[in-house]
Image: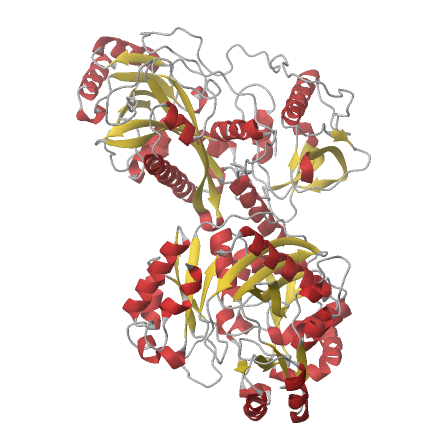
Amino acid sequence: MLSLDALGPEWDCPLGSKDLEEEEGPGSGGSGLPPPSCFPGSWRHDVGLDCKGSPEGAEARAWTVHYYSLLQSCLQQAGLPETQDRSQVPRTGNMLLCLSPAWLTKVPAPGQPGESTLLVSKAVSFHSGGLTFLDDFVPPRRATYFLAGLGLGPGPGREAAELARDLTCPTGASAELARLLEDRLLTRRLLAQQGDVAVPATLAFTYKPPALLRGGDASPGLRLVELNGKEGQEALVKEEVGTFLHSEALGDALQVAVKLSGWRWRGRQALRLYPRAELGPVVDTVLALLEKLEEEESVLVEAVCPPARLPFPGSPSPGPELALRICAVVCRTQGDRPLLSKMVCGVGRVDRPLRHQSSLPQTLEVALAQCGLGEASQVAVVRQRVKAAAEAALAAVQALEAGLSAEQRGGRQARTDFLGVDFALTVAGRALTPVALELNGGLCLEACGALEGLWAAPRPGLAAEEAAAAPLVETMLRRSARYLMEGKQLLLLGAGGFSKKFVWEAARDYGLKVHLVDSDPNHFASQLVQTFIHFNVTEHQRDEENARVLAELVRARGLQLDGCFSYWDDCLVLTALLCQELGLPSNPPAAMHLAKQKSRTQLHLLSRHGPPWPAPSLYAVPCCPLESEADVDRAARQVPLPGVMKLEFGAGAVGVRLVEDASQCHEHFSRISRDLQVEADHPGIGLGWGNAMLLMEFIEGTEHDVDLVLFGGQLLAAFVSDNGPTRLPGFTETAACMPTGLAPEQEAQLVQAAFRCCLGCGLLDGVFNVELKLTGAGPRLIEINPRMGGFYLRDWILELYGVDLLLAAAMVACGLRPALPARPRARGHLVGVMCLVSQHLQALRSTASRETLKALHDQGLLRLNLLEEALVPGEYEEPYCSVACAGPSLAEARLRLLGLCQGLGIDGPHYPVAYFLSHFK
């Protein structure tokens, strides 16, 4: 990321002024050198800012020193250490700050004509705890995401714009896109057409407008007059201005502003304000400004939004009347959805217009209270209206960019990943209304950063607030990961069932080259991959031999693999053995086998007493393996009853049962031994390993899933979900919610229990699903699934957190560390229930048919995850589908789901959805 270019002056004009004479236009008064440094503090100046092989001239060097001093000043004021010069021993980091264009190089990208790879030779790297290092990279590092400060004035901003153009890696901005955002007329028309964003009434005179402004539907309150010349327009201008000043579109506005619009004039123009009744001066100013226009530029006459009188309604408070300007930062998130990150406010006198950097940043609550509005419900209404308008603004920009060519965007990978929106708060229709004044690329983010800087010195009792840039950083990491993984060659063992159809869509979307090994030569996925290898992966007694045979098949086909992984229970141990044969990253086969066999998992962890503490033994549950009828009596004496009997290698809760006494143990053992013997009896649940069982103690408590991402034994991310009560005596899942409703301490206990159990089994790399119960004495382990969570989990985590467990698993398989948010924020709540053929056959054939559920999903009224293709009832059934509802709170999502299930016929006396959701209150 190249630091922001120096901002051009934004000229202030007192409200009463009729004419403010200032030199206008780009580059006025600039010497090409940075402003004189006025950074308080002291730090070392004898650091190596020169980049080997890229010498800088005196002017460029001055800018580099300026930015370095600015960085040190910011670090010092935040209470963080000075940057250490470790150029001789460079460290690795995900976030690199380049203070000079000379630190970066563009080289042609092989096989991608017209595009370039961006290389970093020198940078400031950022590390945990606020540490920064000045690093040299030999050889240069390849950039996987680039966000440039695109200045138009003197300094390195122009060079940054050139560096950002036509890169192979994702870029969060470009000069071409910045020019569009800096054309106030274009963005105002874009927002006006959106319909969800209020903008000031505007009259625009444009000379040879750009193609994006020609044609299109007229917008209320926005009048565009195309001029065929800049001279001889007196009569037309007078008529249009007169009509505009008397139009109802101006509402209660008492003043109008006259200004220039176009990227050349951003922040470099005089603002002229006039009473609405003064037609002559407005016309004269418009005519004078027309002479300055170039092609595709405009002169705007716009209403000055009267500030809302607060408290509203009522009499004005004593003292000068105050105005409010709201800055909102909104970021593009997973699925190209806009998300408001943060808003800050500036408060000032009405007769002194508010500008960026000319007012102190405040929170919305404090700012509204200063203006006399302190009621929490009213503040919440204003916050929600700003959020809706800001997110609609980014959605409009995204829609515009989607219709542009790569050349118009400044490159195939260029797009706007965050947006600043400035709002005035006024009254429209007796309601407090935010009116969008302008869009910007960094000023609002800077204002948010200034507010966050108030808390640089932590004080007791103050909770750390999420940084405004956090969603932007998540987007950077996500786009970077996609770039890194595009074209990777992956061997995948086991195509999985119907519920894994999303894998093939995701693989295509990420540009992965997948080579598939599966037992079914007619599997639909065999036609969706680069290479298909038909091989029986269910003969687990021969896994070691099969791994050697598969390795030879891979070599014989000349596959150059970057990684190998599986998300299918049947193939996990074979995958680890094959990775060992091929020399690919993986967990040790012994660790995978230990986690795969449920009794061995528990007995092994029971023996791990530490250190460190708390030891894995505290989470394990007593159990006993059952291989023959004779083992049942011994187990019933050793394991406290009631207990749980299950298949050693089972999946999907098939064959799991609560047993009260020894006779029930014998009965269930006999039933499973008779009904589930070989793979064909119930494909996909692990019967290729045999049908051995175990008996474990039944643990009282609430059930939870913890989905983990580990790399090199480090915990990168954890997602906790809550399960509703299961349908005893079986343990088929009924309901779930995410994120967890537990207290933070209990959530942390579950995450640590899952993490330590995985480490205790030797699982150091991958995506794992750990099932636990939370008892009065803390978490207890049910089982470890040494693969990505099944059912709806991947979909829900992607929806709520923007993290794709499938992509994370693929990255770890390639030996790449996924860069995931340390504390991901859930963007809402999901609550869901399972539908079972045995309980819902009639509804699934009528009121809750697959077509009906799919239609409701497409309308956004529910979230559907189909888990089975056919409506086939059976004694050992798995859920047919999951139906979920979203909401801003757990309670609202729960109520929506309950009402939906009642209307669709999913709820009933034999399937009481309200009871299954009772844990989620």
Residue 516 position (above or below residue 329): below
Q: Seen in the image, is 870 located left or right of residue 806? A: left
Which residue is at the far right? 88
Residue at image coords 55%, 45%: 474
Placement of the N terminus among the 4 image quadrants: top right
Residue at image coords 79%, 33%: 86
Instruction: Let me know if residue 583 appears in the view.
Output: yes
Instruction: Please give the count of numbered marks on the rendered protein.
Output: 0
Q: Seen in the image, is 256 located left or right of residue 508? A: left
- Corner quadrant of residue 612: bottom right
- Corner quadrant of residue 87: top right
Residue 625 position (above or below residue 505): below
Tell me where residue 342 appears, x and y as whole percent.
46, 36
Residue 731 position (above or below residue 365): below
Tell me where residue 109 appears, x and y as whole percent.
64, 44
Tell me where residue 263 appears, x and y as whole percent.
44, 24
Report the front residue among 313 and 524.
Answer: 313
Tell me where residue 70 appears, x and y as whole percent.
64, 22
Q: Seen in the image, is 399 located left or right of residue 764? A: left
Residue 698 position (above or below residue 707): below
Report the front residue among 70 and 745.
Answer: 745
Placement of the C terminus among the 4 image quadrants: bottom left
